[in-house]
Image (tube, coloured by chain):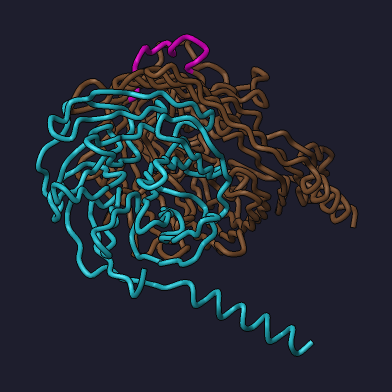
Chain colours: A brown, B cyan
Amino acid sequence: MQFYKQLLIGFIFTLFLNCSYGQLTLSNGKHSLEITGAVSTYFNHRFYKDSLNGSPITDYKKNLYKLKDAQVQLEGRIGNDYEYELQFDLANMNGNFSDPENPGLMDAFMMYKGINWFNITVGYSKVPYSRSSLTPFIYSTYWKRSLISSGEFFSRRDIGITLSKSLSKQRINIYAGMYNGLGELSILGNNDASGKFEYIGRVDFAYPSRYRYREIDEKISPIPMFAIGLNGRYANKQLPKGKSFPTYSTGEFGIKVVDGQKYTYGFDIAGQYKGFSFLFELHQIKAILVDSNSYLLNGLPYEYTKGFVKSGGYLCQGNYYFKKQHAIVGFRFEEMNISDLSEGTSQRLSGTIAYQLNSFNSIIKLQFFKVLTEEQYIDPLKWTEQVRVGWQFLFK
Amino acid sequence: MKVYLLLLLLSFFIQVGNIEKIKPVAKYNIEVNEPSDIQYDSQSKSFWIVSDNGVLNECDLEGNLLRKAEFKGVDFEGVEIVGNYVLALDETDRKIHFFNKQSLKLEKTIQLTYGGARNKGFESIAYNDKSKEYYLITEKDPSYLFVYDENFHLKNQIELSISNDISSARWNNNKLWVLSDEDRKICLLDNNYKIVKTYEIPVINPEGIAFVNDDIYVVSDDLEKMYLFKTSNQ
């Protein structure tokens, strides 16, 4: 009962907030600078277990109101050749680097478009891997990305250089890049002691026209549209003896950056037609570990593990846009296997309902999560279900 | 009560009667990258097509490229013909470039101001040759219709609430026509800028509209195609 009261208060709070829209572009005729932003806040409630591994649950800190986003974005263009972007999130600039899905600094890059056959992007930005990761979250009806693409298995952002090229009316897009390999932790200033880099490539193909990085078919496509993406990444970060990676850089499960070689590859397929849209995405990781005592090897002998562990997962997502009602419904099923040497997998189901007050500029979103199975040895959870409801507001 | 219900029902059918679904009778590939607007030149019997990468092109009636201007802008979203000039509207820089129709040389540029988002600036331009007025419309959030006199002095500003967005506008047969990309529809407006007639079109990303006599040509940006529609009445 207490939960439903809290949910009602959360709803009233979001509905009675004042609505106004802001947008600003400054231009001197050659240099144009656009200033936009986003604020989002939600109410979160978890349904906790009574106990975990025999100990009673005493920490309920995830039942809360959260300021998810307080973003400011500066996007500029100088003539035809230069573009730049600086985007930061004041809600997440607390020096805590443990959440790669919501980093404080989101983008700080420059792009040169003066070469005919490719564009060059340098600085800190999203790396070209995973359609789900590359889709701007402000165009999602969910409050949380799927775990596989949220930055715990592979980084979503990094500092480096990206070459990109579009072909065939932007139906084919090719990306290749070289990065520090520490992901969001790269902004701390140093590479790890190995001094090695990560290499990432992606190709996506769309038919019959270009396919934007969006989840919802807001335009109610009159003909079926599809996009297929293939991507891979490689890093060989063997640390010198006695050295370790920066705190948080290896991610929640210790698989994001590993002491050794890491191969990651995946594909995604997306489609949309008459308001329905879907995404299927799969990722596989092979980590050849230097440390034979790594917890990822689960204490198993080398004869059994051969010194490597496989990890990965997939997500499938479907959405339908009720244009006249300004409403979107969706579901997502995801499965992760943090280590193939540990028994079990994690499965989660999510449902979402969103109501657009003004497209994605002002939208009320509700997401319900249910944990179906969990990889108990490696990732025991204190909760079984979770609900989030809140309001997203963009200054665009 | 019965009368009220009858009127309600009647108004529903009247509304439905003003919406017509039309299908293209022909389509052509356009030799222009990312075409964003189109206008028909009755003198040269050709199309002027601008592109998202800031280029003005002249094409024949089947979309084949005849010639293009050397000058390159940033993001052309509207095109119009006024006298001996072809006007190209640059959304990002909020400029109107005047090209000499014969030489394709840039002869004049006007700077306008609009503070909206970079890609939500002026999306379309249409010219009323009777009143000598220019109609400039912003894409969305919100869609404003700005009425300028022939010297580009602002005469009026009206908020249009007729579609999710407006991607092109055209003055034809003494009426203003607008095209919506997100709603995929063509709307004929009356003098008070209210919808008189709506045509739903099955075109992905329609960005430009032009009239050749009573035929309607629509360009698709994503597909780089041009579609020919014939309507039952105009």
Is A2 positioned to the left or the right of A310 in the image? right
Measured along the vertical axis of the image, is residue B204 above or below residue A266? Answer: below
Q: Which residues are magenta?
A: A186-198
Please name the residue shown 40% across and 64% down the image.
A273
Residue A180: in magenta span: no
Q: Position of residue A299 (x, y in %)?
A: 51, 35
Total marks shown come to 0
Q: Position of residue A350 (x, y in %)?
A: 60, 56
Is B194 positioned to the left or the right of A55 in the image? left
Q: Position of residue A346 (x, y in %)?
A: 56, 51
Residue A192: in magenta span: yes
Farthest residue to the bottom: give it: B2
Please name the residue shown 23% across and 70% down the image.
B25
Farthest residue to the front: give it: B130
Q: Main secondary structure of the magenta part?
A: loop
Please name the residue shown 56% across and 35% down the image.
A396
The one of A182 and A86 positioned closer to us in this rendering: A86
